[in-house]
Amino acid sequence: MARFIAGLSRDQTSLLPACIDDYVDDQNPVRAIDAFIDILDLAALGFEVEPEATGRPGYHPATMLKLYLYGYLNQVQSSRRLERECARNLELIWLTGGLKPDFKTIADFRRNNGSAIREVSRQFVALCRDIDLLDASVVAIDGSKFKAVNAKARSFTREKLRRRMGEIDAEVTRYLGELDRADEVLNKTGMVMPEARISRVNKKLAHFKKEADNNLRAIERRMDTTGETQVSLTDPDARAMATTSKQPRVVGYNVQNVVETKHHLIVAHEVTNLGYDREALSMMAQAAKAAMASEKIEAVADKGYYKGEEIVAAEQAGVTVIVSKPNTSNAGASGRFDKADFTYLASENAYVCPAGERLTYRFTSEEADKTMHSYWTNACATCLIKHKCTTGEQRRVKRWEHEAILERVQKRLDDDPAKIPLRSKTVEHPFGTIKAWMGATHFKMKTMKHVATEMALHVLAYNMMRVMVILGVPGLIKAMRA
């Protein structure tokens, strides 16, 4: 053993440091956690900081917040695991002053203080703004699907209900047919089906009847009553969502993130149960603008966010939008000219077609709550390239009243196509990091409000880790106390 580093004997008496603070050096992240929670006005954020006059004393909200922030920074999100860590983890012993709350107390704090915990996450973003870490002019927006505490087998749509009822009917028909054949054999040969087999078939039939009557039809009645298109039995707010070809469906939540492009800090986030992003652009862009306290910001998003009304709302709120447009043109897909091949002449309020003819304004109409202007020319009948343009008598072009805004957005993208890869490099890394911290199961709580609390803790932990990388632990503590 002389050639190896030897440890101390377990029986040897040693002189420990004089105080517990000596165990934690100046670069330890727990010092930043401690400093951040201590500067917060917990009462203003919504925590109960005045103890009850009677009964057993409780733990101070600051202690529980420090415990949770430490846990999420170190991938320990379970209340039972946090309980164990309080008894054996030297950093937590330092952070909590040696307190050892039980797992139920830990879990209850997170469940009962959701809105206040979400405010703590916003307070750290405000701190980042105050110390000039949110001075970027460009933000990237994206959404990602996170798994809920709800198995796919316990999530239903009307189509899945119909399919499962069909499967049950087929199984019931098969087992009834087996009983009929047994009766036929009995009548012809006198041979009786074994009692165990008859019992098994009857149990199967009873099971299928119970599933159909008590479960599936109850879900169908609930859909009829509430108008829901999906029902999840474990987490009622979770929804089945399409993801990728490798994992085509996940039951969970769609988390929206806005990340600034300079330091890659998450400036705004939102948990939704919509399986698509096209309704979120304006909401997230304006949330980022407010969080950064900027007069003007530029928001970059992918084609999943392309919706005219959302783009217009964001632009009118002072956000410069860059979002790629999905190719939804049936004409273009068929090899014919699409709308982009027609040039709009603003001074004449007319379009010029690929053949050089002018499509003049004809009338205005309301379509799906949009004011649309229609244009066409009478020259289509004699056009030599009509077959490349339309299969009808004439090609008509419709223009939305806010089309000029969409054209400006497209021009920005054409002038600076590098903004799209900038988006992916900026916003996808935080999602990957947080999912790696979460582990395979992602969320551990149920319902939207509790899941939002979990996500706020993850975002707070991610942002704090980023700032500690940028400034260092002593630098962050100094900035917080300035």
Image (tube, helix red, strand yellow):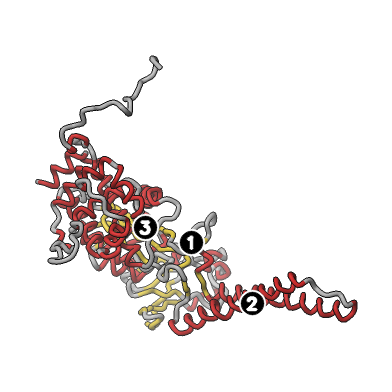
Above or below residue 127? Residue 253 is below
Above or below residue 474? Residue 216 is below
Mark 1 or 2: the one toward you: 2
Compare residues 260 and 148 and report the one nearer the observer: 148
Q: Which residue is mark 3?
A: 142
How far separated are the C-alphas under marks 1 and 2?
31 Å
How far separated are the C-alphas under marks 1 and 3?
18 Å
Compare residues 197 and 177 and report the one nearer the observer: 197
Name the residue at the left extreme.
482
Pointer 1 and pointer 2: residues touching (CB < 8 Å)? no
Q: Which residue is mark 1?
A: 250
The picture quadrant where one finds residue 289 is bottom left
Screen quadrant of the N terminus:
top left
Q: Which residue is mark 2?
A: 206
Above or below residue 202? Residue 22 is above
Q: Amino acid at mark 1?
A: Val
At horizontal 30% and vertical 63% (from top left) the residue drawn is 111
On residue 188, which mark appears? none
Q: Secondary structure at mark 3?
A: strand
Disc with the residue nearer the chain's start (1 vs 2): 2
One can see residue 124 in this view = yes
Count residues near mark 3 (Cα–Cα under 10 Å), then give few for <14, some for 14-19, many for 20+.
many
Expressed as whole percent of the image width and height from the top left, the position of residue 157 reads: 52, 73
At horizontal 35% and vertical 60% (from top left) the residue drawn is 256
Expressed as whole percent of the image width and height from the top left, the position of residue 84 reads: 33, 48
